[in-house]
Amino acid sequence: TKTPVTDSYAVPPLDLTPLLLEPPTIATSPEYTVHTVFVPASLGGLEPDWPDNALLVFRGVEGAEHFCLGGDPSQANLESGSFLDGLPAFGKLLERLRDAPMPKVVVCHGATRGGGMLFPCLGTAVLAHSDATFGFPEIRRGALPGVVSVAARRRLSPAACEWLFCTGDAIDAATAQRLGLVDFVGSWEELDAEVARLERHFLSSAPRLRAPSPLPASEVTIEADADSRVALLEVTAASVGGLWRDALLVLDQLSPSLRVLVLCVEGQGGPSDSLSHEACHRLDAAMSRLSEA
């Protein structure tokens, strides 16, 4: 009779003593700071002169009922066209926020509307008080969101943009968080604690978080979603003539079902580069086919 072969070995007792790991310590570099920007209820008086080496924290003015209501979309300004006077400064504000090399923490309360939506749309971390509401009310004043609609696509889906742009509906903080516009909702005490936590985290990681300086664009680039009811057409060109020549080719291919077209243009050129009559006619014909947009 054969004896069965078995593998026998002694199992050492398990050592369940917890092993405590010290988190890596990263010294906060003195060249990085926290800079708090108090956003006025109306954007007319805001100068984007904050430092490049600072974590930016955007808050409403102390004691203000709302975070920011944007510009002045009054009926008088719409009818006179004077609301267009502030667009160059608003465009510079968008570029300054978008290209800021350090993270941006945005703390919203009360109402955030219209141009004020630029801040949560471009924020790295967006915190909202439980009473906060958000919206793009331009359609109810006979217009559509302009420059801010480009920033909105950083945080909101095309479907959410279509809903909010075309209805002008306001959403509460919980809905904004569900849509991805807001990251954290809480009371003032909870918001202050979260801001402090983010400041510690971002400053300790500042050398790794600092974004490189953007490279200048050297050629035409066009991005358009032809299948969506909301399309973003981004164009960068060395000359106005080249910009519109390529933009028209894309406009010819856009779906007739399009409802909102956002055109973001960056270009340089003098009077000799202005649109020709032929280009104007082609642009008008392309846009007329999008009769519902």
Image: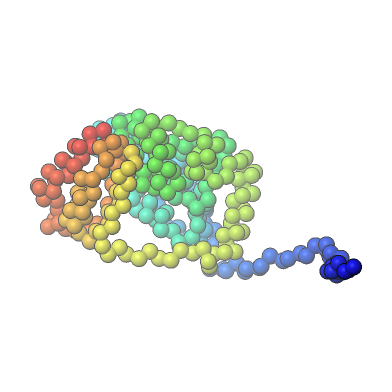
Q: How many marks?
A: 0
Q: Residue drawn 20% across and 45% down?
A: 252
The quadrant in which residue 86 appears is: top left
Whether residue 277 is visible here, answered yes or no, is: yes
> Which residue occupies the foreground of this view, 250 or 276?
250
Q: Residue drawn 23% across and 61% down?
A: 238
> Which residue occupies the foreground of this view, 82 or 263?
263
Q: How is the image coloured?
A: rainbow
Q: Residue drawn 51% across and 63% down?
A: 209
Whether residue 45 is visible here, answered yes or no, is: no
Q: Quadrant of the N terminus?
A: bottom right
Is residue 99 toward the left or the right of residue 283 in the image?
right
Picture coordinates of residue 185 (x, y %)? 58, 41
Is residue 42 toward the left or the right of residue 209 in the image?
left
Q: Residue drawn 72% across and 66% down?
A: 22
The quadrant in which residue 288 appears is: top left
Q: Quadrant of the C terminus?
A: top left
Is residue 178 toward the left or the right of residue 150 in the image?
right
Picture coordinates of residue 110 (x, y %)? 51, 36
Picture coordinates of residue 159 (x, y %)? 40, 38
Q: Is residue 8 above or below residue 251?
A: below
Picture coordinates of residue 129 (x, y %)? 57, 40
